[in-house]
Image (cartoon, helix red, strand yellow):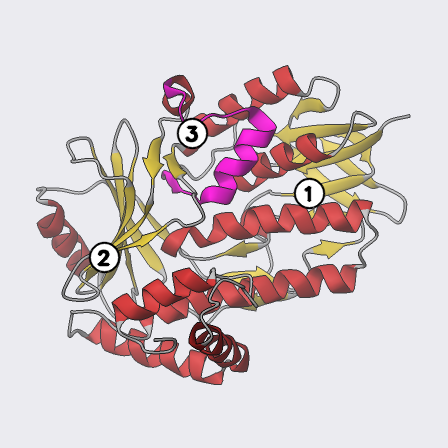
Amino acid sequence: MKRKLAVVGVGSAGLLSLIHFCTWLDDSWEIYSIHNPAKPILGIGESTNGGFVGLLERGTHFFLGNESDLDALDATLKFGSKFEGWRDNSWVNPLLDGNTAIHFNNFHFKDFVYERLEKLWPKQFRVIEGDVTNVSNRPDNVVVTIDGAEHTFDFLIDCMGFPTSYENYTMSDCTPVNRCQIHNVTDFQYEPYTDHIATKHGWMFGVPLKSRKTYGYMYNDSITSKEEVGEDMKQILGVDSLEDKEFVFKCYYTNNLVEGRVCKNGNKALFFEPLVANSIFVYIYAARLFYDYMMAGVCAEKTNAAFVKAVQEMEDVISYYYQGGSNHDSKFWKEATKKTKKRLDKRKEFKDMMAAYKTLKSKGVLHTAPAYGFSPITWEIVDEQMGYGYIS
């Protein structure tokens, strides 16, 4: 009898988990995608990294050089992250190791992935449509109630969106922002970068797709009003009005990635602001950790500790950008600099990592990474461009 893995949810994390396990589990397994077609996903447009493209290549035979694959995802190429207004000159944090990533449209992702998995992994891939009302995590299996009927699986990945309770979660203090105003434009000059534009009240991302470019103004609503941000965003983009689309959020992560036979991923596992595509890294890493938990017998304690360590390093990455401030002498940036610098000053792990990189550079061998977060050369580039002096 075949063993069964369920992945509940079809946001980015759910689809990446499906691709990962269809690729790495053999046909003695069935991998079920469970979702409610009536439930909307958060569709903004996403920036990715080389690991994302690598997973798509393996699991869906996605090919960067195939224009029809890019068209199917409304995707553009990404060579790095462009920073404007953080320092006097604009600069690019490049993708390294020969990597090229993409910007893609979330609304197109499910259909693309389903079509490819059905074609490439017909012995493994299954779909159940319906509303999940209960998940029972038992010693020998997981029982899921879908439209009133019970279905039994060996393991389950929960990608059902934001947690209903933050018990056993850690609320992150790595960022000074908690709200985002969204606006899309169709008339724009494409560049192969994700924009990171420092503004008076925060910063603004720009994700270029083939059909549109999505901007998101990140700010703190206890410092700046929605109206002030709206006026600033209109001026920066040169538009008369903005879409009525925004997100209020808090940053957090679970202390227990795996519990029994269930793994969390996506917004159920963590939420970070979209600075340098942080969350995509962790979604893929979480799937890999759960694979080792399922197949290699890695215990829950080690799995959860590895996840928390990776997330805390991602927090360091976010705080690291903010702690030097920007070109804007504003209340937001004064608060942001103070808050994130104070956090990094308490992080012995961050200090030890930077000291290790500085020692490696002095020996001419800045190519090994004692941490999950950034590659050493990336840290060196950002350190130099931001003028921090941790490594240089």
Q: Residue 107 carries which label?
A: 3
Amino acid type at mark 1: Ile
Q: Which residue lies furthest to the front in this view?
A: 364
The label nearer to you, 1 versus 2, is 2
Residue 43 can be seen, yes or no: yes
On the image, numbered disc 1 is attached to which residue? 157
Secondary structure state at the residue bearing disc 1: strand
Q: How far apart are marks 1 and 2 (CA)?
A: 39 Å
**In magenta stretch: residue 52:** yes
Amino acid type at mark 2: Trp
Question: How crowded is the residue under tag 1: few (<14 C-alpha within 10 Å), some, or many (20+)?
Answer: many
Instruction: Tell me if label 1 and label 2 are in contact, CB under 8 Å.
Output: no
Q: Quadrant of residue 382?
A: bottom left
Q: Residue 91 carries which label?
A: 2
Secondary structure state at the residue bearing disc 3: helix
Q: In the figure, is residue 278 to the left or right of 141?
A: left
Q: Residue at x 68, y 43 (%)?
A: 157
The residue nearer to you, when weighing 3 against 217, is 3
Above or below residue 28? Residue 42 is: below
